[in-house]
Amino acid sequence: MSDWKAICKVDEIPLLGARRLPRKLGGDVAIFRNSEDKVFALLDSCPHKGGPLSQGIVFGESVACPLHNWTIGLDDGCARSPDEGCTPRFAVKVDSGVVHLDLEELNSVALREVPSAA
Amino acid sequence: MKKMKLVMVGNGMAGVRTLEELIKIAPDLYDITVFGAEPHPNYNRILLSPVLAGEQTLDEIVLNPLGWYTENGITLHLGKKVVDIDRRNRVVKAEDGTEAEYDRLLICTGSNPFIPPMPGKDLEGVIAYRDIHDTNTMIEAATKYKHAVVVGGGLLGLEAANGLMLRGMRVTVVHLAPWLMERQLDEVAGKLLQTSLESRGLAFKMGAQTQALIGDKDGRVMAVQFKDSAEIPADLVVMAAGIRPNTALAIKIGLNCGKDNRSGIVVDDTMQTITDPRIYSVGECAAHRGTVYGLVAPLFEQGKVCATHLAQFGIGRYQGSLTSTKLKVTGIDLFSAGNFTGGEGCEEIVMSDPYGGVYKKLVIKDDKLIGACMYGDTVDGSWYFKLLREGRKVSDIRDKLMFGESNIGDVGHEGHSHAATMADTDEVCGCNGVSKGAICKAIKEKGLFTLEEVKKHTKASASCGSCTGLVEQLLMFTAGGDYSKAPTKKAMCACTDASHQDVREAIRKDHHLTIDAVYRSMAWRTPNGCASCRPAVNYYLISTWPKEAKDDPQSHFINERSHANIQKDGTYSVVPRMWGGTTNSSELRRIADVVDKYAIPTVKVTGGQRIDLLGVKKEDLPAVWKDLAMPSGHAYGKTLRTVKTCVGSEWCRFGTQDSTALGIELERVLWRMYAPHKVKLAVSGCPRNCAESGIKDVGVIGVDSGWEIYVGGNGGIKTDVAQFLVKLKTAAEVIEYSGAFLQLYREEGWYLERTVHYISRVGLDHVKTRILNDADGRRALHDKLLFSLDGEPDPWFEFEKAGVDARQFEPLGVI
């Protein structure tokens, strides 16, 4: 059973941009919105050197990490070839323009990652 | 759905590469069957020479072990020569009766050695040099026999001769032309090569025509006879007089192979044969626009194009390649490319040191490098090849051209120029910290063949590019062959085929005002570009149509979106503006208070004469800016950064001009200026040049009678000394000329192109024509700059006007 928690409205996330959701128990979650108003959530940490993905340039269904320009897929959290590595992703539900994340996931996924300092 | 059937005839490098590309993009489209005449899986034919020379083993040069075919579900018929193809019923038939049906057919039969018709060519001990079997025959012969003759002093012949000599044979190379490798080298370089090979023990017979091969009573070759009836002993004769496309099968089944069937299998830009749309051909058997290529880079490019068409994507065209030549004989460096023989209207620059064994010749025509031939010192080969392909004008670097890229300033690999002598732990790429060992490992394990692939996989040479020559040498020794990418007009990024220049021109011509309009009208392949093209297009819009096109904040790199520099831990640095590097006690007090209040861990003086506050949390940025109450230093943008000054005549006992005052004035005019890349200025008050004006985008040096202006300097990856533009009398003139130059750069520069690269692309003469010879044009440029900058907001204080999305500083509540 998912425990959906309302986080923000879709239009509170910049178009082709992201917002950051800090967690008390673990690393921040980055919530992205692309040009088609699709919303994605990933741990705010690049699999390469932990760069804050929420600060990257969003295009198509990808984000470019602001530190070394790795391209990370928003749908799967994985680096595009030839780079390798994945960052944890979080399930997203959009209901009447409101973004929901699964509280159980937020309280259990990637808790041991170092919280971003940003 | 039932899969289609793809049959490949020939199991060589170009063909298998095509399959690899195909499987990458359309893994489930075809059932694939491969016929190979040799009993081996695909191996690196280019590395047969190192195997012959005993430097590598056969196992090491296998590219696709048998397991690769199994893993990819490919039916492999080894040692089965295809003898016929029924095009009507679409069936391939092998010598042993094996048959395979096809929907698509790929013919990659490669080439055959050319054996000149002469008596005795069928004797035992007379072989060509083409495959593993030939190589093994030579290795075996070297253990039993003494005298070897190689017919043909080209690339292949010399590599064979060198290998046989290293295996203990006495080798004579017979060559028809007056010097070696006459199609790849000029006479001087060819003779230097000969001298060097002679000193290693090879013998040569030049300008000699072979008439017959003479056999002993057992039918084995024993001598080579020349036209003048002279004879030399030979227990082994290697025929290396060239190769011909292997088109026997293609001709048999009626594919067009050019006039009198003398060319290769004729294909179009999609690598489809012009005769049968179901049949494709790549590699040394294919003739594209009249040319048959024999080097790896063009063939792999053909493979890539062919794969996209087999995958039914219908994109990509192969448009031909420029190639260069290197010899794989360890310890001998030679390189040639383009037209190195010169001719009408060509100029030559030659450096010749026959005793030192170094020779370099560059051929220039219409201010462009069109050919290069080098012997002994080839580390700059790839740089020359790049200049040649790009058709860059060379007048500005002509005086240093001969001495190579390192002479126009480059750092980062400790001056290494010979990859072979480096240790595995030595760093090749100083930008990304990649060692020689790491590069060689990646080349071997991931089967990399081109510079582009090495860049992608290892990041070596992917940043500043100054180690490109070393990486190419490593590719050469590790994978063999020549690996220069073919020339293309450089597309902005993978989203489009349009170049930066195309986009700039379209925006001006069609008066585009939004990124979307550009993407739609120029048929972008992606809905909203990527992290490379979007910032570039956004810049082109606002620089071409100031006050009309609206800046898009989401198309800026994070630093320009948050107006601070992101650091490796995700915090930011803040650099307030200090006009001309001057400050005062109240600013310093405020800085000190901010550092305490926000617990900023590091305070550092920058190279641009200001103070950097490092480790600021993103949510603190707006408050830090407010408390500092100093203008944004724009240290984070493709903008005017600083105007560095010395103290000048106000204090300095040597100062001739008030450099500080002029620097402050320039900075006040130019701040908030966005540009293709960052822009740095300096003003020195006398020729002692304490502000380092010689390495700035615009450097001003005060002399007793006025000011000298230098442009295009750079103190970064490559140290570029600025070039003299003009000498002026007054400070007002300095501001007008500098502004006009920077506006020209803003309008014509490509995104991320520093002034030095902009000037080298368009030529300093162009800049002079626009800025010095055209007074009205200069004033118009300067006015346009002032118009663009008029009323531009300070992003630290006017969020709305500057398009700063304040939501970025506030996290969404805490979970």
Image (spheres, rainbow, N blue to C red):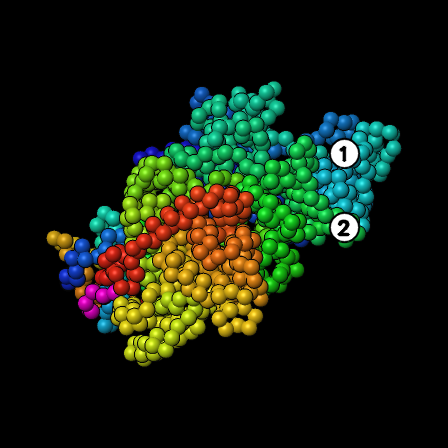
State the residue at coordinates (56%, 24%). B257
**Which image quarter: residue B395?**
top right
Query: Badge 1 local density, few (<14 within 10 Å), some, or many (20+)?
Result: some
In the rendered structure, which amino acid carries the disc numbered 1? Ala
Say above or below: B657 vs B165.
below
Residue B177's disc number: 1
Rendered position, B443 above or below B87: below
The residue furthest left is: A96
Q: Is residue A25 left or right of residue B490?
A: left
Chain of the residue on which disc 2 is drawn: B
Give the answer, above or below, for where B497 lies relative to B572.
above
User: Where residue A29 appears, x then y in whole percent?
Assistant: 26, 64
User: What are the residue bounds of the magenta stretch?
Assistant: B808-815
Where on the picture, by quarter, is residue B122?
Answer: top right
Q: Inspect this view and state whether residue B447 appears.
A: no
Q: Which residue is mark 2?
A: B353
User: Along the line of sight, which residue is nearer the eye, B204 or A31?
Assistant: A31
* Percent coordinates x, y for residue B710 in the rendering: 53, 55
Q: Residue at x 51, y 65 (%)?
A: B657
